[in-house]
Image (cartoon, rainbow, N blue to C red):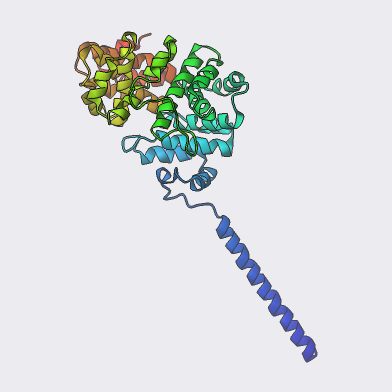
């Protein structure tokens, strides 16, 4: 081969080799750029405030696995309350998985993922044909507990979608089919209203609510006269009372006595709900908070607290609620505690063995309460 041709051939080889090396380098760089995030040491609780990181994690792990990690990080909710983080997982999860988000979610962390998914669904779909749209989603839940949590999420989502117009949200909740659906929606609405006042709501940006007052611990309950709406309002209202009193349970116990007479018991049930949330459902802490309540309403305090334990775990409940009953010393309140738990079990589980397993954890003299 002539020298000139040989030199040209060598130059061609060198350029070709360089091109291939650059191509490999570029592709390797691209692979690195688009490589899925390493989730082996991922702390879900630390990234729920970062939409991009949480989106990447959900795309790789899915909602169910992400929730499993969050629940483990919270030590079953005993290290921190994972409900708000679960809301965020559900909100972003629906953006990614759409209706599949509801099937991937579960009841852990007080059903926060369900609630969050519902919030995004309503933000995208609006309230047109609300009843039929919600029926399609919530009817897929196999238990009354699951249906309640689904409908409760509607109240959160509708209020956020309507820019925290409480009266209009009441009207939308009334469009749902049946009192169970409507009351579940009212409860979610009132909870969302207070959470937003506390800076923890579902709305994005600088959403605020005008439906609380700094000088009235009973507002907005005080503007309603429909009994079922009043009940749902007072079942949440102590959260605002605690905010105003800088979390003085003594002051809130006194304030509940100022509720309308027919709703004092409901107010103390709400007190128990907040007591359980504040102490992360620790039975000893619940007993201590409820000891501030007059004996007349102690049963309501324990009941409200126990419902939080049950609702936090949902179908994953084992003996957590039973432990609270065991610590109650007054016989009538202990009996009421076990009765409430026994009455809730059929709504939680599809199978009898799970119900019987929990009933067998009751103190022997109370096991007969499970004999329906």
Residue 2 sits above or below residue 362 on the image: below
Q: Nearer the viewer, residue 18 or 353?
A: 18
- Asked whether residue 157 is in view, the answer is yes
Q: Is residue 301 above or below residue 102?
A: above
Q: The N terminus lies in which quarter of the figure? A: bottom right
Judge from the rendering whether residue 63 lies leftward or rightward of residue 245; answer left or right. Answer: right
Q: Nearer the viewer, residue 167 or 19?
A: 167
Number of numbered discs on residues: 0
Image vertical order of residue 316 relative to residue 347, above or below: below
Percent x, y of residue 255:
27, 19
| Residue 72 screen position, x and y as percent | 38, 39
Q: Say which quadrant the C terminus sits in.
A: top left
Q: Quadrant of residue 9?
A: bottom right
Q: Can you give x and y, in whole percent of width and height, for residue 156 in the image?
A: 48, 27
Residue 247, placed above or below residue 291? below
Task: Tell me which residue sits at (54%, 22%) in the image.
Answer: 138
Give percent across and percent down for residue 69.
42, 41
């Amino acid at each position: 081969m002539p020298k000139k041709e040989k030199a040209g051939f060598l130059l061609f080889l060198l350029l070709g080799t360089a091109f291939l090396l650059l191509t490999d380098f570029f592709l390797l760089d691209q692979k690195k750029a688009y490589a899925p995030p390493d989730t082996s040491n991922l702390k879900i609780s630390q990234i729920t405030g970062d939409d991009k990181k949480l989106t990447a994690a959900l795309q790789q792990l899915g909602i169910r696995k992400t929730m499993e990690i969050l629940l483990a990080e919270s030590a079953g909710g005993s290290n921190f309350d994972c409900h708000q983080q679960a809301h965020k997982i559900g909100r972003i999860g629906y953006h990614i998985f759409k209706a599949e988000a509801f099937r991937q979610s579960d009841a852990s962390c007080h059903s926060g993922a369900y609630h969050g998914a519902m919030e995004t669904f309503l933000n995208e779909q609006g309230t047109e044909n609300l009843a039929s749209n919600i029926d399609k989603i919530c009817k897929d839940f196999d238990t009354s507990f699951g249906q309640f949590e689904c409908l409760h999420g509607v109240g959160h989502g509708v209020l956020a979608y309507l820019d925290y117009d409480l009266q209009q949200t009441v009207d939308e909740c009334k469009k749902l089919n049946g009192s169970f659906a409507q009351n579940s929606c009212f409860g979610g609405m009132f909870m969302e209203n207070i959470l937003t006042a506390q800076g923890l709501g579902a709305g994005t940006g600088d959403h605020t609510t005008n439906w609380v007052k700094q000088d009235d611990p009973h507002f907005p309950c005080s503007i309603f006269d429909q009994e079922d709406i009043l009940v749902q309002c007072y079942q949440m209202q102590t959260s605002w009372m605690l905010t105003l009193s800088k979390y003085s349970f003594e002051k809130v116990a006194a304030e509940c006595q100022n509720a309308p007479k027919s709703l004092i018991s409901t107010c103390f049930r709400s007190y128990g709900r907040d007591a359980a949330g504040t102490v992360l459902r620790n039975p000893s802490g619940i007993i201590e908070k409820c000891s501030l309540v007059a004996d007349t309403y102690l049963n309501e305090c324990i009941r409200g607290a126990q419902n939080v334990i049950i609702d936090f775990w949902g179908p994953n409940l084992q003996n957590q609620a039973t432990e609270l009953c065991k610590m109650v010393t007054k016989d009538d309140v202990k009996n009421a505690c076990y009765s409430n738990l026994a009455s809730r079990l059929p709504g939680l589980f599809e199978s009898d063995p799970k119900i019987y397993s929990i009933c067998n954890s009751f103190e022997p003299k109370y096991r007969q309460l499970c004999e329906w």
